[in-house]
Image (cartoon, rainbow, N blue to C red):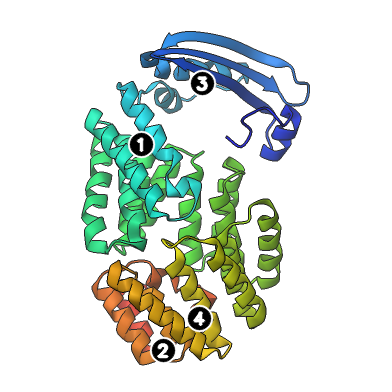
């Protein structure tokens, strides 16, 4: 969608995507009627290798998709393997309206657009739910539902999310265990249940089924990164970026990899460069963490304050928690206390993840309160902070503490 409108020339797009051939097309819809034009273009010569127009009804959209895929493969002199041909020909649903709802769900999905805004998650969930109401056998929509349920960790406790997420993932697999998205959905559920071996197995199966899935390669890369397998993480994330070079989410995780592997100078330089292209609050927050890790609290405060100023009330607690930590490290205890009081007031109105408070008390040096909250997080099965802590420089001072090691053992992260 970043190229919609035709402002960039084909050769420029090809360079940005690192490809030799571009598939270009347009879709016009009037009622149930579709007019689709498609053309395959050699990026160097601008020659048209193939072109076609389709005047069909909406119900024929999957037949058109299959036709285009196979014709493009032939034009590129690529032979589709039987499994690939089967995947191309397979219809995800016979209900065109359900498929349209699924696409709308993807359009607002947080893992596509970035961020964890409740509005986006809830809107996507509603689209996916309506899709499975229209077609109860629509595996892709169940996989989307699983992600929406689990992505709500910022504002819903584990017990409210996990059963629904697992049920959706299991349903997707039951309907189609040869669908990569079904295995990704189950993998995500297993991760949040602390089954890390199961997670890795399912993501690798997703890659076997769909080697060009940027999401699967990214998920495997994140897994490797969190467990300190940085070289393997880099391989997978680079592959994800090659497959989807315009994804801001993939680029953000690659920056996080630099931070976690302690390449602070390179991480800060590349984060600044990324902000020139896409100035997002999360990048300022990451840069704040990088500067904090380097001991430059002044710069860390500046970046953290920029992040806080750029977010809405929904995400504000998570960004001011970072700011409170930096204030604490910089000796500004009164500012830290002020933020803690604000967060306590917010927690009376809505659910806040335990690490929002645990991180602040950790930075204040109050380990008793830190572990009290982290142990509550374990009891409540808040699944994010403990796996993330394995390689995050933020937890360097805490990682050797006996109570922290005992918590990691409970989760299965320490032997």
Cα distance between the residues tagged 4 and 3:
51 Å
Badge 2 marks a residue whose secondary structure is loop
Q: Position of residue 155 (x, y in %)?
A: 33, 62
Residue visible at 70% across and 55% down in the picture: 276
**Which numbered disc flags the more N-terminal residue, 4 or 3?**
3
Left or right placement of residue 25 versus residue 209 in this view:
right
Label 4: which residue?
Answer: 325
Instruction: Count neighbours of disc 1 (C-alpha within 10 A) and say few if under 14, some if 14 to 19, many if 20 or more.
Output: many
Q: Residues at badges 3 and 1 in contact (C-beta under 8 Å)? A: no
Cα distance between the residues tagged 2 and 4:
19 Å
Quadrant showing the N terminus? top right
Label 2: which residue?
Answer: 401
Q: Position of residue 157 (x, y in %)?
A: 27, 64
Label 1: which residue?
Answer: 179
Q: Position of residue 350 (x, y in %)?
A: 30, 66
Report which quarter residue 17 is drawn in. Answer: top right
User: Residue 26 has which mark?
Assistant: none
Q: Nearer the viewer, residue 203 or 149?
A: 149
* Observer able to see residue 135: no
Badge 4 marks a residue whose secondary structure is helix
Badge 3 marks a residue whose secondary structure is helix
Residue visible at 35% across and 91% down in the picture: 368
**Which is more foreground, mark 2 or mark 4?**
4
* Observer able to see residue 357: yes
Label 3: which residue?
Answer: 69
Instruction: Count neighbours of disc 3 (C-alpha within 10 A) and say few if under 14, some if 14 to 19, many if 20 or more.
Output: some
Q: Is residue 65 above or below residue 247?
A: above
Left or right placement of residue 329 versus residue 345 in this view:
right
**Which numbered disc flags the more N-terminal residue, 2 or 1?**
1
**Which numbered disc flags the more N-terminal residue, 3 or 1?**
3
Q: Residues at badges 2 and 4 in contact (C-beta under 8 Å)? A: no
């Amino acid at each position: 969608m970043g190229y919609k409108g035709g402002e960039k020339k084909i050769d420029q797009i090809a360079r940005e995507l690192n490809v030799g051939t571009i598939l270009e097309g347009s879709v016009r819809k009037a009622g149930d009627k579709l007019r689709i034009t498609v053309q395959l273009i050699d990026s160097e010569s601008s020659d048209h290798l193939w072109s076609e127009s389709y005047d069909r009804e909406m119900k024929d959209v999957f037949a058109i998709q299959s036709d285009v895929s196979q014709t493009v493969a032939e034009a590129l002199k690529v032979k589709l393997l039987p499994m690939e041909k089967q995947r191309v020909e397979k219809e995800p649903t016979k209900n065109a309206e359900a498929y349209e709802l699924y696409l709308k769900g993807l359009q607002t999905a947080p893992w596509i657009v970035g961020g964890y805004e409740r509005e986006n998650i809830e809107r996507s969930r509603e689209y996916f739910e309506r899709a499975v109401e229209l077609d109860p056998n629509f595996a892709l929509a169940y996989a989307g539902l699983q992600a929406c349920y689990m992505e709500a960790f910022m504002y819903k406790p584990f017990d409210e999310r996990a059963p629904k997420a697992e049920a959706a993932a299991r349903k997707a697999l039951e309907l189609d265990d040869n669908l990569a998205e079904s295995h990704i959905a189950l993998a995500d559920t297993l991760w949040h249940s602390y089954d890390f071996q199961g997670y890795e197995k399912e993501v690798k199966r997703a890659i076997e089924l769909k080697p060009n899935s940027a999401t699967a390669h990214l998920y495997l890369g994140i897994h490797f990164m969190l467990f300190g397998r940085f070289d393997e993480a880099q391989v997978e994330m680079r592959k994800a970026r090659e497959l989807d070079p315009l994804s801001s989410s993939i680029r953000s995780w690659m920056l996080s990899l630099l931070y976690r592997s302690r390449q602070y100078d390179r991480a800060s330089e590349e984060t600044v460069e990324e902000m020139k292209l896409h100035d997002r609050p999360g990048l300022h927050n990451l840069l704040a963490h990088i500067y904090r890790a380097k001991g430059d609290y002044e710069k860390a405060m500046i970046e953290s304050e920029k992040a806080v100023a750029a977010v809405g009330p929904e995400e504000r607690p998570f960004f001011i928690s970072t700011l409170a930590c930096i204030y604490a490290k910089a000796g500004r205890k009164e500012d830290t206390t002020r933020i803690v009081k604000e967060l306590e007031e917010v927690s009376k109105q809505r659910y806040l993840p335990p690490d929002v408070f645990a991180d602040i008390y950790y930075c204040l040096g109050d380990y008793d309160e830190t572990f009290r909250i982290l142990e509550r997080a374990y009891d409540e099965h808040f699944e994010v902070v403990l796996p993330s802590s394995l390689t995050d420089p933020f937890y360097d001072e805490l990682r050797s503490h006996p109570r922290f090691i005992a918590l990691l053992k409970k989760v299965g992260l320490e032997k």
